[in-house]
Amino acid sequence: MITVYSPDHRLQSGRFELIGAELVPCYEKPERAEIVLARVREAGLGDVVPPASFGRKPLLRVHDSAFLDFLETAWENWVRAHGEKDALPMNWAVRTFRQKVPRAIDGKLGYYCLDAATPITEGTWRAASAAADTALTAASLVAGRERAAFALARPPGHHASSDLYGGYCFLNNAAIAAQSLLDGGAARVAILDVDYHHGNGTQSIFYARADVLFVSIHGDPVDEFPYFLGYADETGEGEGEGTNVNYPLPWGTEVSTWLDALSEGAKRVSAFAPDALVVSLGLDTYKEDPISHFLLASDDYLEVGRRIARLGLPTVFVLEGGYATSALGVNAVNVLAGFEA
C-alpha cells in the first residue's frame, strides 16, 4: 500500500489547549505523524510518496471561500493584535447571539471555531493545506486503480465542516478526498469514520446529499465531544435522508461490541453500493488513549482492517485521531496490514 506523507505537517505545532479546565500541552502534536511514518517503514508496508499540489479549487468543493480566507490570514491578523502566541478563541457565536462574522480577529476565531483546543499557529495554513493535498493524492492513486492508499494526514480533519474548525481539525481531509472521487467520476462514495469522536464536520458537509453515505462509530455524544452531533436519530435530510448512520456507543465499550457496530455499518455500506470508500482512520479507540474511553487493543486493529477489506472497495485511508503516541504507529499499521492481508 502506498503511503502519502508531507513533512509540512510539522508546521502545525501548538503549545497549549484548554481541556478539563486546564491549559495543557497539545495532544495533537507532530510526533503523532512521525511515529506512524516510522512504523510504516519498519513494517515494509510499501512506498512512501510526497503529495502533489492541488491548489484551492478542490478545497472550495467542500469549504466556504470566506472560511478559507480566514484560515489563510488568521495568524497574520492575530499577531497584529496580540503578538506571536497561539491563537485561541475566548467567546463563541452561541445560540442566542447573531451569526455574523465580526471584523476583529478575536471575534472571527469565536465565529469559525468550535472549541478552545485547536490553536492556530504560524504554520497552520501550510500544514492544513498539505494534509488536504495528502488526502487528495491518496484519492487520485485509488482513482487511478490502486486498490488502496494511506493518507498520513496531519492535522486531522473530520471535525471541520464547511465553515467551522475545531477538534484539532482545520480542513476536512476525508470529505475533500470523497468529493474529489465524485468529481473524478464516482457515482457514489461511502465514508466510514472509525475515530472515537464523532465526525461532526463530515456529517454536516454531506447531510443533505444522496451521493455520499456517512457511517460513524463513536463515543455517545451524551457524554463525549463533540456533544452536539452524533446521535442515532440523525439520518440525513432531504435528498440525503437515509445516508447518515451513527452508532453512538457508551464509555467502556469493548472490542466485541465495537466490532458488532462495524459489521452493521459494513452492511449499510454494502447496501449503498458505492464506487469507493474513504476511511476516517482514528486510532483513539485504543484502550490507553488519554482522552478517550473505548477498550480496543493493538491486535484488534488487524481485525478492523480485515473487515474493511471484505467490503471489496477501492479504499482511501485518511489518518484522524489517536493520542496514545507510543502505540499509535503499531495500531495504524495493524489496520492497514489487516486490510492488505
Image (tube, helix red, strand yellow):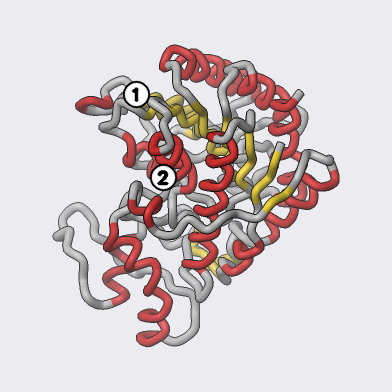
For the point 43% across and 47% down, which residue is it? 159
SS label for mark 1: loop
Labels 1 and 2: the sequence-earlier one: 2
Mark 2 lies on residue: 226
Amino acid type for the residue under numbered disc 2? Pro
Q: Is residue 196 left or right of residue 61?
A: right
Of residues 53 and 44, the one nearer the viewer is 53
Expressed as whole percent of the image width and height from the top left, the position of residue 287 reads 68, 37
Instruction: Give the camera-side residue of 87 and 333.
Output: 333
User: What residue would you read off at disc 1?
Assistant: 243
Instruction: Kindly identify the residue that appears in the image at 38 percent across and 79 percent down.
Output: 78
Quarter occupied by the N terminus:
top right
- Specify whether residue 222 is in view: no
Q: Splitting the image into 4 quarters, where does residue 151 fall?
A: top right
Q: Residue at x 35, y 69 (%)?
A: 90
Reply above or below: 20 against 341.
below
Where is residue 318 shown, x and y percent of the image?
57, 42
Q: Is residue 303 visible?
A: yes
Residue 54 position within the rendered picture, expressed as x and y whole percent measured from the top left: 48, 55
Please, what secondary structure does the residue beneath circle 2 have? loop
Q: The disc labelled 1 sits on which kind of residue? A: Thr
Q: Is residue 159 left or right of residue 111?
A: right
Residue 245 appears left or right of 129 = left
Within-10-Å neighbours for mark 1: few <14, some 14–19, many 20+: many
Residue 186: mark in rendering? none
On screen, residue 64 above or below 266: below
Disc 1 to disc 2, C-alpha distance: 20 Å
- Mark 1 or 2: in front is 1
Q: Residue at x 47, y 23 (%)?
A: 275
